[in-house]
Amino acid sequence: MAGRPDTNGGIGAWRARIAVPASAREFGRRLIDGDTSAQAIAAVDGEEDALVLEGAVPVYAIPHIEIDHVPARIALPTGRLRGNAHGYTAFFTECFFDEMAHRHQKEPLALRMALLGQTPRLAECLQRVASLAQWDGGADQSGQGLACHALGGGYIAAIASVRREEGGVKVERLSAVADIGRIVNTDIARQQIEGGLLFGLGLALGCSTRYVTGRPQFETLGELGLPTLRDTPEIEVAFVTSDVEPVDPGELGVAVAAPALANALFSATGLRFRRLPLFSEEL
């Protein structure tokens, strides 16, 4: 990641260079063509894959943007995740954005708002979540972190609130405001956002499965290590009223959970977390 401020206090240039396998192409060959893992990996070696860069282009008004895919080959088969590439590209983008804001002494919310003139729906999500979570500017020791993202025609902004405790950090609250167009069923929409936030939180903290000879060893959600009720923070979700066509809300929460948490951890601890998962023992 690289960025350069402009003379007006914004961001003038942005570059992301991402080394990752052509996962979507490889997964497709295994799923559709019936290739073995070894065949699929060999077949897509060196190929570019636009789907593994989904979400990497910032939503902000930055005049010069460059996104590079460096095809990488690893011995393990790869595939999609809930949120697909947005689960890591949003993490890169929103965490690096906060780093740039901090380095140039800009308030994270104010800098985002200044660069969202062409994306008013996301700007409204940001304004509303700041009110919902009582955003205090992300000052040192506040324990609050902000992230926003656009995915599939939907928009979401989230704030994570954490508290330092003896032996670690506790996630106290996740607040989110989403614009998913016209809502058909509010309860289901809320459940989808809440589920995405929890899934993203679990991924940020290291929940996963194990594979033996290419087969997953866990067959139920309970075995994945997702947050239990005891470990689940308070979750607040609100929606922007809209008459535009509805969009699927199921993956929005996944994209913003990890960067909001990482930015909150920086506020609480002064440490930057640039890797996923954010293993609890590192706290």
Image (spheres, rainbow, N blue to C red):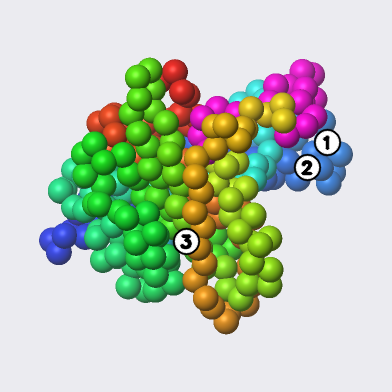
Residue 232 picture location, percent across and down: 54, 37
Q: Is residue 204 magenta?
A: yes
**Relative to 4, 265 lies left or right:** right
What residue is pinned by disc 2?
A: 29
Residue 132 picture location, percent across and down: 39, 59
For the magenta stretch, what is the residue range? 201-221
**Relative to 208, 97 lies left or right:** left
How far apart, in angstroms, are the residues tagged by discs 3 and 2? 37 Å
Q: Amino acid at mark 2?
A: Arg
N-term-proximal mark, 3 vs 1: 1
**Relative to 105, 143 lies left or right:** right
> In the figure, 16 relative to 129: above or below?
above
How far apart, in angstroms, are the residues tagged by discs 3 and 1? 42 Å
158 and 56: which is toward the camera: 158
What residue is pinned by disc 1?
A: 35
Q: Which mark is residue 177?
A: 3
- Which of discs 3 and 1 lies nearer the camera? The answer is 3
Residue 22 seen in the figure? no
> In the figure, 62 relative to 26: above or below?
below
Callout 2–callout 1 Cβ contact below 8 Å: yes
Mark 1 is surrounded, within 10 Å at the Cα level, by few (under 14), some (14 to 19) or many (20 or more) other residues, namely some
In terms of secondary structure, where does tag 2 sit?
helix
Q: Amino acid at mark 3?
A: Val
231 and 74: which is toward the camera: 231
183 and 31: which is toward the camera: 183
Q: Amino acid at mark 1?
A: Asp
